[in-house]
Amino acid sequence: MTGRHSQPSEIIARLADIFARLGAHAYAGEALTVSQHMLQTAARAQAAEAPDTLVAAALLHDIGHLIAEDAAYSASDTEDKRHDELGANMLQGFFPPSVTECIRLHVAAKRYLCATDAGYFDTLSAASQHSLRLQGGAMSDSEIDAFRRLAYYEDAVALRRWDDGGKIIGLPTMNFDSFRPLLERIKT
């Protein structure tokens, strides 16, 4: 791929390659692979009859864990590796902001939910609780106000909830190719 001027279908082929080559890596701290988690998250969005852009965001939300050597999460991490930014930046220009901004905001949505939903933190897996600490913990009141002013914050919160539920060991899912037509429909 040669940058933003590549054929739009090239990004989908590249994503398929990433899923195939790297998606089978263990989702650190969880008992499933990264691709299983992303496919489960997308399936949850589809089951909720979310728009195609949100299903795509759910499918690709953790792509940042796979695209940089040091972006994969580890339970021994001591700093946030910004997989949300990495993924959104990679996809920007290929998909509309309704996809990329939800990906960019899905970590902030976790911080938001921890600050605004009293029982939310206790529903997080141990790995997600650990990464939350690295990502800044629950939002402050001023961060909540700023987050609520963002165009895609509600969609990012929905994505976050599907993300949290997309960690079921052994759950059959569709494969990446099942989502190709959806991705083709929404690419920029």
Image (cartoon, rainbow, N blue to C red):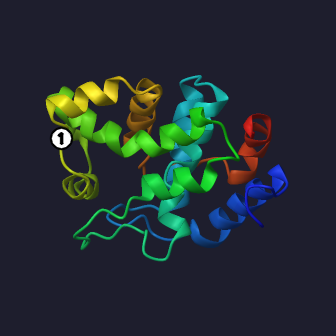
Give the percent coordinates (x, y) of residue 60.
Answer: 57, 49
Residue at horizontal 41 percent and vertical 49 percent from the top = 167
Q: Nearer the viewer, residue 135 or 52?
A: 135
Q: Quadrant of the N terminus?
A: bottom right
- For the question of whether residue 133 can be seen, the reply is yes
In the picture as drawn, the residue positioned furthest to the bottom comes out as 69
Q: What is the total number of numbered labels drawn onto the structure image?
A: 1
- Drawn side of residue 79 relative to residue 84, left or right: left
- For the question of whether residue 119 can be seen, the reply is no
The residue where tag 1 is placed is: 138
Give the percent coordinates (x, y) of residue 102.
Answer: 49, 37
- Drawn side of residue 8 relative to residue 21, left or right: right
- Identified by mark 1, the residue type is Ala
Element under label 1?
loop
Relative to 178, say whether 158 is above or below. Answer: above
Give the percent coordinates (x, y) of residue 54.
Answer: 57, 32
Residue at horizontal 35 percent and vertical 45 percent from the top = 107
- Drawn side of residue 184 relative to residue 44, left or right: right
Q: Nearer the viewer, residue 61 or 2?
A: 2
- Drawn side of residue 58 relative to residue 157, left or right: right
Q: Nearer the viewer, residue 47 or 138?
A: 138
Q: Quadrant of the C terminus?
A: top right
